[in-house]
Image (cartoon, grey):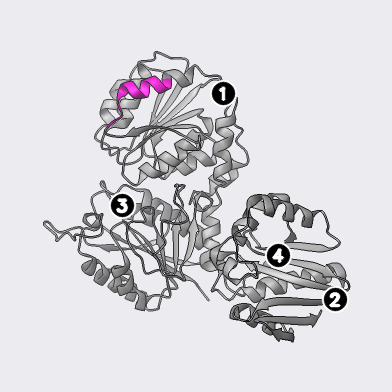
Amino acid sequence: MVLRVVFRADASQTIGTGHVIRCLTLAGALSAKGAEILFICREHEGHLCDLIEERGFAVYRLPAPADGFTVEATPAHAPLLGATWQEDAGETSAAITTLGTEPDWLVVDHYALDHRWERALRPLVGRIFVIDDLADRTHDCDLLLDQNLVADLHTRYTGRVPADCSLLLGPEYAMLQPMYAELHERVPPREGFIRRILISFGGADSDNLTGVALAAFSSLNRPDIEVDVVISDASPHAPAIQNHVAGHANIHVHGSLPTLAPLMVKADLAIGAAGATTWERLCLGLPAVVVTLAENQRPIAEKLHKEGLVRWLGHTDTVSEQSIRDVLAELVESDSDGSWSLRCHRIVDGKGADRIATVVTITPRTPLKVRHARLSDEALILAWANDPETRRCSFSPDPITAETHRRWFHSRLRNPDECRFYIVETQEGIPIGQVRFERHDHTWETHYLLAPQFRRRSLGRSLLKAALEKLQTEFGKTQVFGRVKESNLPSCKVFASLGFEILSSEKGEVMYQRLF
């Protein structure tokens, strides 16, 4: 059966291009898995509908905003929509009905839309997936993604999404073009003195920070340092920048580019905005001096600065040519040991779009593979184990400390005869959960855990079945039992579906057993 996914996202001179660009990246990953894609976009000034069609995706174009359209009071970014939410919901509904069939997913990436719009569209779609960065409004969705790194990341959506909504949080889900994952494994850390700088502030750059940064660099009088400047062909500041660099052989101006990756690979330092490009720079281990252009970028830049991942100069209204010059003067005289670059490299691996595509497309029929747990899985398994829902279903509901988990995990890895610890993955290597078998004389006790983002997708049976088959190939015929809380109905159903029989049931605990 073909998966059908509809995207609702906009680009404009005010909104910028980031929402549509990241949706295009996800659409590419979904299309590679066989999904049919439709974009629904309003024709704002600066829209990217033509680019979407160039990438091979259908676009349903909503009309450009009418002069004097009614602006809603909420949410805060309602003016960006170009219509009332009711009008947009009606137009989007009409677009969806042209498909002639119910889409499996509606992906919404728009700061101006909230639970009211989503609730109006829910009868027309299978599931709703919201991409957000703000956590400033409530949503009616089944899946929510926030790819950012902020101080309150794991609590900021509490009360803003339904209780059964799955959350994809953090830079591991940053949606980057496929080449970034490949380059992530190839690009060495930046060491030594700065010899090349990349200046890029994105598609809008209404404050001409590109020109300000270029002037700051020029004042250093360093012809020995190469500079790449990226400025949109449509920017009103482009002619002035071209005039500025005339006669400077070390400064190279680039127009609109399909990707910044090649320039990032060459660069030792970047100067730019704290927006979506942040994750591309981190993936390639590129140190950066950043300026925030929008309010939602402030907490991200603050956290990244605190973690030593970027140098945040401040907000656009406080940054001057002198402040950029001062930090550049300091950095170009520094002999880097590579530690800054390595910190960046560890945060993003470029596989975020593939992870998300797996969450969206996975079914109980998806082929799975099983491998032994590795030392590098420690943090992942701890995060799964400390998920609130996992703890509620556990016989020991208290959170697990990192040190306690480390001792326990290492002891299991060092005793393979008594413990078989498996990670179950998709064929592309995306982990969906873990299954552990602990030996008791001639039987094995099983414990399994599905990653939170894969819950409520009927995957528990597939997970445990794959691990049981792996155990059988390693040990032959063997007796397996499992214990679950009587109230944990999904796990009870999983054991029953795999032919386990109830061995005992008392004090709220059910014991299942089967010979494999």
Does label 2 or label 1 sit earlier along the sequence?
Answer: 1
> Crowding at label 3, few (<14), some or many (≥20) Cα neighbours within 10 Å?
many
Residue 321 lies within the magenta run: yes
- Reading the image, the residue beneath label 2 is 478
Q: Quadrant of residue 340?
A: top right
From the image, state whether disc 2 or disc 3 is nearer to you: 2
Proximity of marks 4 and 2: CB atoms separated by less than 8 Å: no
Q: Position of residue 380 (x, y in %)?
A: 62, 55
Does label 4 or label 1 sit earlier along the sequence?
Answer: 1
Of helix, strand and loop, which one carries label 2?
A: loop
How far separated are the C-alphas under marks 2 and 1? 57 Å
How far separated are the C-alphas under marks 3 and 1? 38 Å
Q: Tag on residue 336? A: 1
Of helix, strand and loop, which one carries label 1?
A: loop
Of helix, strand and loop, which one carries label 4?
A: strand
From the image, state whether disc 4 or disc 1 is nearer to you: 1
Q: Tag on residue 369? A: 4
Of helix, strand and loop, which one carries label 3?
A: loop
Which of 146/203 is in front? 146
From the image, state whether disc 3 or disc 4 is nearer to you: 4
Residue 42 lies within the magenta run: no
Q: Position of residue 55 (x, y in %)?
A: 42, 54
How far separated are the C-alphas under marks 3 and 4? 40 Å
Q: Tag on residue 11? A: 3
How far separated are the C-alphas under marks 2 and 3? 58 Å
State the residue at coordinates (32%, 73%): 119
Which residue is most to the front?
Answer: 507
Which region is colored magenta?
318-328
Q: Tag on residue 144? A: none
